């Protein structure tokens, strides 16, 4: 028996040792920079919603690849422009679903790469309007001989669930401050309110105008010609070529052959974005002695838990983000900070906690705020420091307002035979109960709290933007603005992307414009350990809801209470 136990223990030890060695080798190989051939082309394949924040990176031995992010593509194209091994870039967007501001960033990055004199080719397969918008930044656009081009204008869709909820016996109680703060309309109405229609038209006009202008410039047409062309879409492959929207109809191998001829070299080696992301910036002369932190705050804002560390995939938690900001604040090697925000807002208290920590950091280090697709309501609130705010022309921002909402499930519970019986003390003990509707007194009390929170929000905006309360109140009211409109109203300072934010923060930190710097993205990618042991449950919830509801921030809404959150979620296709 003793020999058996010794043998069993030895076997277990050998297995654990083997697993340890396997993971050590896998992780070690992940950190080794790849060899890039002297004649290489960087292949930029992008699909779906390209995130701002890195997710889980698995070792290559486990079939893993680097997570493609917006800051990652930005940095990789900078490296490629300076890298003598990279002779060209080939764009292959397919099924992109990210917002128009992120597409602006990607497009700007491609245009910056082209200044190196290296060619950019784009190859498309049944491209959507988003795919084509990005590809239009290339020198030449290739389309499969039988692939349609789905360029057909824009359509904004909002979902309304009141009819379904009525059938289920569910009502939703909503109170808000700001006439445009129509959060909850999706649960209480069956169509857009006049205010929602006004804002939605404004958003679509802005995005459409940007789309037409960019495409017209890229394809050497005037604005009227491009708008008329879009009205004729979608296009067959032949129509797209004949209209001058694409340059050639080719199979992919043929496109590569033409790139080889353009480079006057042997066939270039294809280097994936995932592989190239492991090339150190210092190896191509982009590193510098000054370190700048790029901190990503992405997702709906919730309080979270004390164990959060800022790497959750789907939410921006006050606990986790505050830890990241404290870490950067205490790191003497970090000379300046760019805070990248992509958030529709969320809980009032969580937004306030992040706002406080952001202001503490701004007192310690030079800081610039860079807005991505969305930085509205609570996402705008946390940006309210004295630091400059940079937004894209199509960033959704503003939405300065406060809302309260709760579902009342009494009708649904009754239909399925569930009765709620309660004992309570205190006149308003049931104010947040899912079984009872609000009384007139409770509604009045909530209104007072919402109005007070709204006044505090407007006051903070006025102070941060050096405006009067009245000036901000006039453009607040819960209204969502595009970045170009927000700049006109003094809500943001500059239109631009990551390069603009980096230039501004270098100037603030006294770093010469021509001096290269080292940019470190926070949070760092999640490890295999995080995947196995620390994956938050809400990630799975969001994965189930996303196909139906898209980016609706359910984590914040399900938390209830007072919210600084976007009034609606407009899907512009």
Image: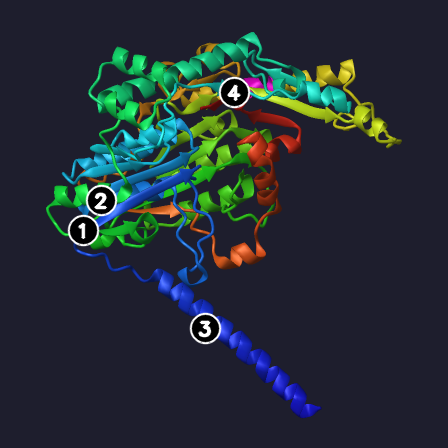
Image quadrant containing the C terminus: top left
Instruction: State whether residue 295 is above or below residue 524.
Output: above
Distance, label 1 to label 3, CA atoms, is 38 Å
Q: Which mark is residue 157?
A: 4
Q: Which residue is mark 3?
A: 21
Classed neighbour count for the residue bearing mark 2: other residues with Cα under 10 Å, few (<14), some (14–19), many (≥20): some
Distance, label 2 to label 3, CA atoms, is 41 Å
> x, y (%) of residue 328?
41, 46
Q: Which residue is mark 2?
A: 256
Q: Are marks 4 and 3 in contact (CB under 8 Å)?
A: no
Distance, label 2 to label 1, CA atoms, is 8 Å
Image quadrant containing the N terminus: bottom right
Instruction: State whether residue 550 is above or below residue 525.
Output: above
Is residue 7 located in the magenta-colored stretch of the structure?
no
Q: Which residues are magenta?
A: 451-456
Left or right of 172, for residue 116: left
Asked where in the image residue 352 lies, by quadrant, the reply is top right
Q: Are marks 2 and 1 in contact (CB under 8 Å)?
A: yes
Left or right of 347, for residue 231: left
> x, y (%) of residue 199?
48, 13
């Amino acid at each position: 028996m003793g020999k058996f136990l010794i043998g069993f223990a030895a076997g277990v030890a050998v297995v654990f040792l083997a697993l340890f060695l396997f993971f050590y080798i896998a992780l070690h190989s992940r950190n080794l920079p790849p060899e890039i051939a002297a004649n290489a082309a960087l292949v930029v394949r992008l699909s779906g919603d390209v995130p701002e924040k890195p997710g889980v990176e698995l070792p290559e031995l486990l079939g893993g690849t680097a997570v493609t992010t917006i800051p990652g593509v930005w940095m990789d194209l900078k490296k490629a422009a300076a890298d003598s091994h990279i002779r060209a870039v080939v764009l292959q967007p397919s099924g992109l679903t990210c917002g128009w501001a992120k597409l602006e960033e990607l497009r700007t990055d491609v245009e910056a790469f082209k200044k190196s004199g290296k060619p950019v080719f784009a190859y498309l397969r049944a491209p959507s309007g988003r795919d084509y918008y990005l590809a239009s930044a290339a020198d030449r656009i290739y389309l499969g001989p039988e692939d349609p081009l789905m360029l057909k204008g824009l359509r904004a869709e909002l979902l309304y669930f009141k009819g379904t909820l009525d059938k289920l016996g569910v009502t939703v109680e909503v109170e808000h401050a700001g006439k445009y703060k129509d959060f909850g309309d999706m649960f209480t109405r069956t169509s857009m309110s006049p205010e929602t229609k006004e804002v939605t038209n404004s958003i679509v006009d802005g995005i459409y105008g940007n789309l037409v202008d960019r495409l017209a410039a890229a394809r050497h047409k005037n604005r009227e010609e491009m708008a008329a062309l879009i009205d004729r879409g979608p296009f067959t492959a032949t129509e797209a070529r004949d209209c001058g929207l694409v340059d050639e109809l080719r199979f992919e191998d043929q496109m590569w052959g033409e790139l080889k001829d353009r480079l006057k070299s042997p066939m270039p080696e294809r280097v994936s974005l995932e592989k190239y992301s492991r090339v150190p910036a210092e190896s191509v002369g982009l590193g510098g002695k000054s370190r700048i932190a790029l901190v990503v705050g992405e997702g709906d804002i919730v309080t979270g838990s004390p164990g959060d560390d800022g790497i959750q995939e789907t939410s921006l938690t006050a606990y986790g983000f505050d830890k990241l900001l404290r870490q950067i604040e205490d790191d003497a090697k970090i000379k300046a900070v760019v805070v990248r925000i992509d958030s529709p807002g969320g809980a009032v208290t969580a937004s306030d906690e992040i706002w406080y920590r952001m202001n503490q950091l701004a007192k310690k280090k030079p800081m610039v705020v860079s807005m991505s697709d969305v930085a509205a309501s609570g996402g705008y609130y946390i940006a309210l420091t004295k630091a400059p705010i940079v937004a894209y022309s199509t960033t959704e921002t503003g939405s300065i307002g406060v809302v309260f909402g709760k579902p009342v499930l009494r009708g649904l519970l009754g239909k399925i035979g569930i009765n709620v019986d309660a004992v309570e003390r205190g006149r308003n003990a049931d104010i947040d109960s899912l079984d009872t509707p609000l009384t007139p007194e409770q509604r009045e009390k909530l209104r007072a709290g919402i109005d007070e929170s709204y006044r505090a929000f407007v006051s903070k905006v006025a102070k941060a933007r050096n405006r009067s309360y009245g000036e901000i109140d006039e453009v607040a009211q819960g209204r969502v603005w595009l970045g170009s409109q927000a700049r006109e109203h003094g809500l943001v300072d500059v239109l631009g992307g990551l390069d603009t934010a980096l230039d501004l923060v270098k100037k603030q930190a006294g770093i010469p414009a021509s001096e290269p710097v080292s940019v470190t993205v926070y949070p760092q990618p999640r490890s295999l350990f995080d995947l196995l042991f620390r994956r938050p449950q809400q990630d799975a919830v969001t994965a189930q809801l996303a196909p139906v509801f898209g980016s609706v921030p359910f984590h914040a809404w399900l938390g209830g209470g007072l919210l600084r959150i976007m009034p609606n979620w407009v899907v512009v296709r």
